[in-house]
Amino acid sequence: MKYAVIGTGKLGTTYATAIAQAGLDLVIGARDPSHSAALAKTLGGEVEGGGICAAVKLADVILIALPYPATRDAMRKASDQIDLAGKILVDISNPVTPDYQDLQVGPHTSAAEALQADLPGTVVVKAFNTILAQLVPPEARVGRQLQVFLASDDDGARRQVAALATALDFRAVDAGPLRNSRYLESVGMMNIQFAFFLGAGTATAPAWSHA
Ligand SMILES: NC(=O)c1ccc[n+]([C@@H]2O[C@H](COP(=O)([O-])OP(=O)(O)OC[C@H]3O[C@@H](n4cnc5c(N)ncnc54)[C@H](OP(=O)(O)O)[C@@H]3O)[C@@H](O)[C@H]2O)c1
């Protein structure tokens, strides 16, 4: 199984680092391939870095760490150039407005559902959107097992991304069909409110508790 991380910003860098440190097979893609090549070089070993299309082409599971709607634009452009059929696209986005006070999509749909509608041959899994970049490194959450909520219409793809979450020391939580992304994106927005506007700080993360 080969993983791609698309984007070399805060989240792309932290996930690429965590995935490489977990010993998984990784390629990094960015619109400026010099950024992905530089990040890959810091991770050493077998990690490759290149353009977005090249990375998507090589990978089975693609974690897209771009802002919304760049996520949709980048994947649509990739689909014009390569066959994306069967690829698992992991949508980690919180489609927030520039002032972080509203969601750009919803409440009756979501960024993840829009991505799936754009690319029906792929399988979209919503995941990781409720985990802030500061909590991605396993060493930043010693003694805590954070939950990663996964929504998808494909059980096999959800299991595959759950395995990735587990490999990164998270607890994978089945959050049902892809349409539940519209609720997960609201939870992600609330997490941002706690972390950045209500004083909880960036070590905050939501958890679901069952009796
Ligand atoms: N940061 C968090 O804690 C966090 C938590 C959960 C979810 N998320 C989600 O993760 C995604 C990325 O967030 P981030 O914090 O990593 O953002 P960021 O630090 O601003 O990085 C954004 C990345 O996207 C690339 N990019 C921007 N516009 C692009 C375009 N039109 N085409 C191709 N690449 C483009 C940038 O490339 P350049 O370097 O070339 O500009 C950069 O690599 C967002 O959807 C966000 O909602 C973030």
Image: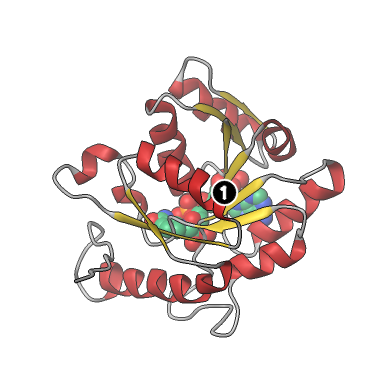
At x 57%, y 73%, the residue is 179
Q: Amino acid at mark 1?
A: Gly
The secondary structure type at the circle numbered 1 is helix
At x 60%, y 69%, the residue is 111
Q: Residues within 10 Å of mark 1 (few under 14, many from 20)?
A: few
At x 24%, y 62%, the residue is 204
In the figure, 42 relative to 106: above or below?
above
In the figure, 197 relative to 20: above or below?
below
At x 17%, y 42%, the residue is 142
Residue that numbered label 1 is attached to: 156
> Does any portion of residue 154 appear in the rendered image?
yes
Question: Could you say where residue 148 lies in the image, as x and y percent from the top left?
Answer: 37, 56
Question: Could you say where residue 190 lies in the image, as x and y percent from the top left?
Answer: 35, 75
Which quadrant of the figure contains the N terminus?
top right
Which quadrant of the figure contains the C terminus?
bottom left
Q: Is residue 92 left or right of residue 132?
A: right
Between 60 and 101, which is closer to the camera in this rendering? Answer: 60
Quadrant in the picture for residue 119? bottom right
